[in-house]
Image (cartoon, coloured by chain):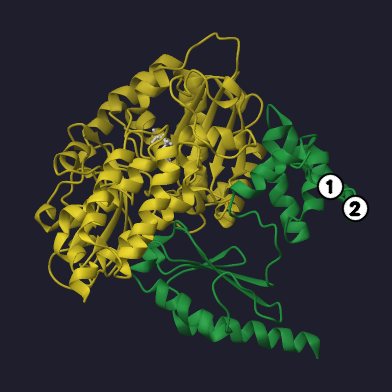
Amino acid sequence: MSMQVDTTQMEKVSFNAEQLEEIRELVARYPHPRSALLPVLHLAQQHFGYLPMNVQQLVADTLDVNLMQVREVVTFYTMFREQPTGKYLLEVCTNAGCMLNGACELLEHMCRTLGIRVGETTPDGLFTVTEVECAGACGGAPVVQVNNVYHEKVTAEHMDQLIADARAQEDGGVA
Amino acid sequence: MIPSDPSKVTAICFDRIHLPGQATLEVARKNGAYSYLPTVLNEMNREQIIEQVKISGLRGRGGAGFPTGLKWSFVPRNTGKPTYLLCNADEGEPGTFKDRDIMRFDPHLLIEGMIMAGFALGVHDAYIYIRGEFLHEANVMNAAIKEAYAANLLGEHILGTDFSMHLTVHRGAGAYVCGEETALIESLEGRPGRPRFKPPFPAVEGFYRCPTVVNNVETLATIPAILEHGGQWHKQIGVPNSAGMKIFSVSGHVNKPGNYEVPMGMPLRVLVEEYCGGLQHGDVPKAVIPGGSSTPWLGPEHYDVPLAYDEIHKAGSMLGSGAVIIMDETADVVALTRRLSHFYAHESCGQCTPCREGTGWLERVMLRLEAGGCNARDIEVLQDASEHMAGRTICALADGAAAPILSLLRMFPDEVNSYLAENKA
Ligand SMILES: Cc1cc2nc3c(=O)[nH]c(=O)nc-3n(C[C@H](O)[C@H](O)[C@H](O)COP(=O)(O)O)c2cc1C
């Protein structure tokens, strides 16, 4: 069938013993193992960095659900990513409260500084910039999440500093 | 300490929020957390609790404002199925950021409220559905829950009673619609968050088709004070039909944006000027969104509206989640509406045609309007389409998508006209 995805040719991945134990504990908290799908996808994304098809197959096998059900969930929720991102994922909220406090200008500034467009990753693989919906922290607008950590009342200078620090650390690490 | 004289109450949910270390059980207990719980578990029965919550006049703080005690009384007994309690911590409505502060600063208050609600409803398994982005808040909640288990405040035979309840934090993954209670249930069942047709309501058929109560964080965090001080006490705070305190999340063009817990009925102007440091520019707002991005906008003529359910309704909008977004004279209302139309198009789950097609279409017209490519006929269609989306779908997301567009066209026709192609030339 055309809807089926052939994962047999893909590199096999697995969870380690500790993760399997964590998954067992997660599953036990719900009336049905299927409820553990979002938590297990979070766990998998945390471990593998993103959710390529072989990881989705692994999640499906682990929870004994159909791969298509996993895919349906992965593609529905914006936090689940089928593509890798840069080492630093910069998510800029541009919804109402942030927009009224300069978020669009901030986003533009970040893109200009990094030489990329929204949704792209710098060629060195360090930074990805995305635009996200309301982060639920509008009192601290504009809000930028850096690898899921909230930064509030962010200015262009803050972001320049954060980017410079990350680069310096990276250069230090290489040398 | 919350005073037992209702006229002296200055905070309920935020009463202990700024105390250092409040997120830990040791400090929270020193400050009074769980002190009344044994009395509730040992001396009150389910009916008495529900009765007090009914008397209190508490209405759901998540947006719809449904009376909490009444909702609890709809839960059928002796169905042979378990009853579930789900705390809605999805906090996705643009402008809303109050539940986050309760969870990260006073997690034990929410846990205590959930234990009491769970006891009243005969719940054995409860869940907190928290938006995925709130990773820090989920971690704080999990740490607090762990402490509560260790102190026998959760788990089997809580504080030596017959009551047992388990509590689990469940992270969403970035979908606004999952804040809608039936979408939340779908999501908790490991599926995309597509709202279910009601009835049956969750109270009768919810999580895995079992009786389920869904309540907002702020609603549940109000329960301990109501049970300790009595329903009548709570009813005397605020104004008729809008009892109690309410957290307003104020954002946009104010000097001190943030969460402010104030008695219901406080005039909007007082909130903005005395609490939020006034407007960034000018003396009166250009427009105010009083209850989150899905509620109709109010104009400067409503600057003195009392922040209460009926009064805001009379002014033409809704109290919603208490998310007040202020626009001063510098606001570009066309750009803001375009941005909101993108939000709804992005967040529509796609199952109802008017919403799926309508939201995408509204966004495209708004983009074209902003770029100077619309004519007067497009504006009529914008109006028509918005009117025809509202109320024609399974959930209220489509109504929310229509609200900003209809507000813009009603309040700012001149500004909209100035964008039209014929006037731009
Ligand atoms: C599109 C949509 C999104 C919603 N988002 C939330 C939310 O993030 N948090 C919330 O508590 N209620 C939200 N609600 C309201 C819930 O459906 C429900 O009314 C509420 O959780 C009930 O709890 P309460 O009675 O304590 O307010 C939303 C409703 C809709 C239609």
Q: What residue is at 48 percent from the left and 43 percent from the top?
A: B177
Residue B414 percent coordinates (x, y): 14, 64
Q: What residue is at 41 percent from the left and 35 percent from the top?
A: B395
Based on the displayed image, in which of its 4 quarters is residue B4 positioned?
Answer: top left
A128 left or right, relative to B69:
right
Q: Which chain is yellow?
A: B
Respond yes or no on whether mark 1 lies under 8 Å from ligand 1. no
For mark 1, what is the residue? A6
* Quadrant location, the C terminus of chain B: bottom left
Most foreground residue, A108 or B244: A108
For mark 2, what is the residue? A9
* Quadrant location, the N terminus of chain B: top left
Q: Secondary structure at mark 2?
A: loop
Most foreground residue, B196 or B207: B196
Residue B178 percent coordinates (x, y): 51, 41
Answer yes or no: do the residues labelled 1 and 2 have beta carbons within 8 Å? yes
Q: Colour of chain A?
A: green
